[in-house]
Amino acid sequence: MLKMIKSIFLLLLILFTAAAYAREIKPGVIIDKENYSDYLPALKNMLCPSMFVAYTEGLEKGWITMPVVEKKKVPPPPGFIEATNKYYRQCKLLPNNQLTNWIAGAPFPKPNTAAELAWNAYKTPSLPDDACFPSKFHLIDKNGKKERGFTWVIYKKFWMGRRHVAPLPEIPGNNDILDSKESIIITSPFDVKGFIQLRIRYWDLSKDDECYSYLPALRRLRRLTGSDLTDPLLGSDTIPDDFQIWRQKINSKITFKILETRDFLAPRYYLGNKDPATEDLMKGNCLQVEWDIRPFYVPEVMTNDPDYIYSKRVIYIEKENKSYCLVWGDNHDQKGRLWRSDAQFSNYEPSTGIHGARSHSYRNLLTKHATFLVFKVILDGSEIPLEKFSIKHLLKGAR
């Protein structure tokens, strides 16, 4: 009995000592290898689970520091608030998760349910109406060493919900049929050069995406099934359904629940208003960026589908600026284990008015393998030609 009392007293002493030395995270703090243990309780509270694992490892190994800076006001994307105010009153959400009468912008600027909040995030414009963005992939092993990489070019065009590139708000003649098209061409290295993928998304929830790939090694074009869209791309930790944090098509099986709403640390490319190459910021399996403190919604997305790769997603949505930007996603396998994650590292681009991603980090928490996707969106205000989304044109580019 005396031994048990001593053990309890010792545990209470440890907890009291840890609490006494725990430090508060606030602007001006720089967390590094020497002091990170003092901030562990606060870091665990202010980072999503996957980022806590990755960045405490980065701090422990001295790969990175975490400077916390004053929060800057970030305006919403061009045309988004105007479209929201113009069209939101007509939006309705049916019991099968189908959104009706949506034209553009956030369908529910004052969300009353988790499903309405999820649809706001789902329709957040993390990309412009028409965009081209050359990208680089960097595959990082569990020791923080780069294994290999590849490059691609992505073209993205929205047929619906257009806000700032004519024609607005929908491509003429579409009549709520197509949501968007996306094409990918791998440009290097030689062993994967020429791989192409075309993804066509329909607005109707009951109609699956169409996805086609050209495999240069086989010289064959194949249509992909839904399960193929959850396969890692070319040995990376990236799957198409994790693009922009959450690209799985909403269906009638999915259910939503808001877990909490509170402040978290958000990664930012402020860096003293400099614009360094993202590759220069890669340190181990982390990015050397700045952090500010922002309020987030944290909803849970239950797939309710034993045949899908994940049992659930926990997504982190910025609460400010009314654009419902997705910043993190923690994805759990069918056994309930935290498996894969995606983090979006953003910056406000004064020249374009776009608050968008500069890079994504994809992680496999079970193997400790990571992939960085680094890109710069090319914005010139013009439309992407429709030929960029035809198999014939893509095959010419691949060859």
Image (tube, rainbow, N blue to C red):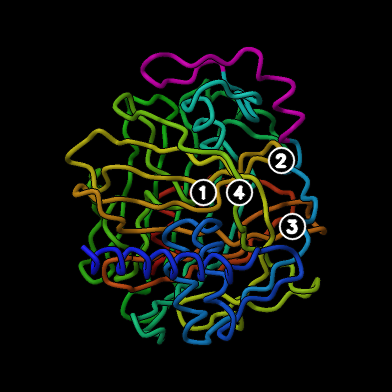
Where does label 1 land, which residue?
387
Q: Is disc 1 placed on a helix, strand or loop?
A: helix
Left or right of residue 159, residue 332 in this image: left
* Type of amino acid under label 3: Tyr
Q: Is residue 175 above or below residue 367?
A: above
Which one is closest to the eye, mark 3 or mark 2?
Answer: 3
Q: Which mark is residue 348?
A: 3
Where does label 4 land, which residue?
127
Which one is closest to the eye, mark 4 or mark 1?
Answer: 4
Where residue 251 sits: x, y (%)? 34, 28
Q: Is residue 27 above or below residue 187?
A: above
Whether pointer 4 and pointer 2 mark residues with C-beta atoms closer than 8 Å, the reply is: no
- Whole-Å distance between the Cαs marked 1 and 2? 18 Å
* Type of amino acid under label 1: Glu
Residue range (magenta): 80-101
Which one is closest to the eye, mark 3 or mark 4?
Answer: 3
Q: Is disc 3 placed on a helix, strand or loop?
A: strand
Q: Looking at the rendering, which quadrant does residue 225 occupy?
A: top left
Q: Residues within 10 Å of mark 4 (few under 14, many from 20)?
A: some
Q: Is disc 4 placed on a helix, strand or loop?
A: loop
Where does label 2 land, which residue?
165
